[in-house]
Image: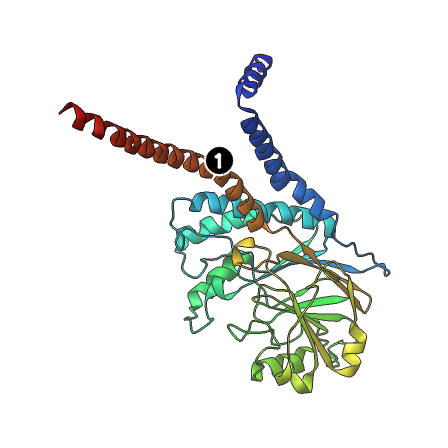
Amino acid sequence: MARISLSRMRKKFMRLHPIWRVYSILIVLLTLYNEVFIYVLQKFKWSNISCQEDHCLRMLLVGDPQILGKTYDSSYYSPLANFDSDRYLAWYYEKAVEHVRPDVICFLGDLMDEGTTANEQHFEEYYERFGQIFPTHPTAKIVYIPGDNDIGGDDGEELKPSKVRRFRQYFSEKPAWIINDNVTIYNINKITLERPLKDPRLDITDGDDGSDRYIRIFLSHLPFLSNPGSFTYEAIGKLKPNVIFSGHLHASRYVRIHRKHLRAATYKPLSGDKKTAYKVHTFDLSYHKDTEELLEIVIPTCSYRMGVPEIGYGFAVIDGTNLKYTVLWTTKRFHQLISYVIVVAIPLAFLLFTILFKILKAICVCKRNARTKLPLYNQIS
């Protein structure tokens, strides 16, 4: 049966006009490139980071996935848009996990696009979808913090305690996570102005917080050093971060500044040009500690639906007192979708041109006939 079907398809294909045969081949090749080959080729551009120390920590940082909901976009094509967005996120997340081989995966907020507006039923549906797109890892520790799209609180939006409790219930949000003997991660929430009240490693007997013996990482959805207030200064003074990872800006940025000059903090592009896009950046965290200089790295969004051209995942390695960081850039899905629109538009434009040409030709014929018949009619009369 399969051979008969293939034979029939081949005969039908050969009956087509040569132009349409070429066009059909072009469609197949474009689809294979956009849906298979481009993803494989993109992986070869990603940088690998090797460890020098035996107990280094490998981190995958996921910024602003914002899986789409059902309310904001109610157009007829929204189910297809959601499917394509979910598929894009799931494919690259799987490949990023394979590439990084992470010990910890950090989601930096805005997990859902409609987390604040979703009712209980929709929120549970989004949560299940999120788990299908970003499944748990058998060995890596997973860390989730909320964003303004998950609990509200940005740009004057009301922050509801019920939304905060719901996120914590579903995603097991914690104030801090002891990752290993060398690294502690702190949940610093600039939306709710909450942070760990004390270090979980605090040695109560002698009051030594052990900051010389391990690396302290801040996770914040909103850029932490931007517009510093009393909350920012207190968190820095009490918990003494070696490095800060944040999201929200949907772009790859960083800032290094002395803690006494925070109000002058300016975020600069990181891996934002072709020459440094896949570069591995190295930061000496012991130097930052000795000079009281703060380092914050903003992770780009991993969703092409956020309206920015550069999309990717953060890949960081804590290797002794060194931080090695690069961005795993992903393909520009909108460009791929536009290529489909262009290719589909070609035959439509050709068909429209043909129809217009026939209509104009018919009009000209009618006018010509009218001019030739009128004198004959006058002669007969």
Q: Nearer the viewer, residue 232 or 185?
A: 232
Considering every residue shown, the one lying at the far front of the view is 379
User: Is residue 174 visible in this depiction of the protein?
Assistant: yes
Residue at the image point whose x is 43% and y is 70% from the top: 159
Residue 6 location (% of width, % of height): 58, 17
Taking the image as drawn, is residue 132 in sight? Answer: no
What is the x, y in percent for residue 103? 72, 55
Q: Residue at x 75, y 81 (%)?
A: 206
Q: Quadrant of residue 219?
A: bottom right
Question: What x and y, as percent, mark residue 41?
Answer: 71, 44
Direction bottom: furthest residue = 260
Instruction: Reply above or below: 380 against 70.
Output: above
Q: Please tell me which residue is depicted at 78% across the width and 54% down the height of the picture.
A: 48
Name the residue rendered at 54%, 46% in the picture. 337
- Please state if 240 lies on the left or on the right of 111 as rendered: right
Residue linked to disc 1: 347
Instruction: Report the quarter where the N terminus lies.
Output: top right
- The type of colouring in the image is rainbow
Name the element at disc 1: helix
Q: Amino acid at mark 1?
A: Pro
Q: Please name whichever residue, 151 or 273, is drawn nearer the observer in this view of the structure.
A: 273
Picture mark count: 1
Vertical placement of residue 273 versus 191, above or below: above
Nearest the viewer among 368 and 263 is: 368
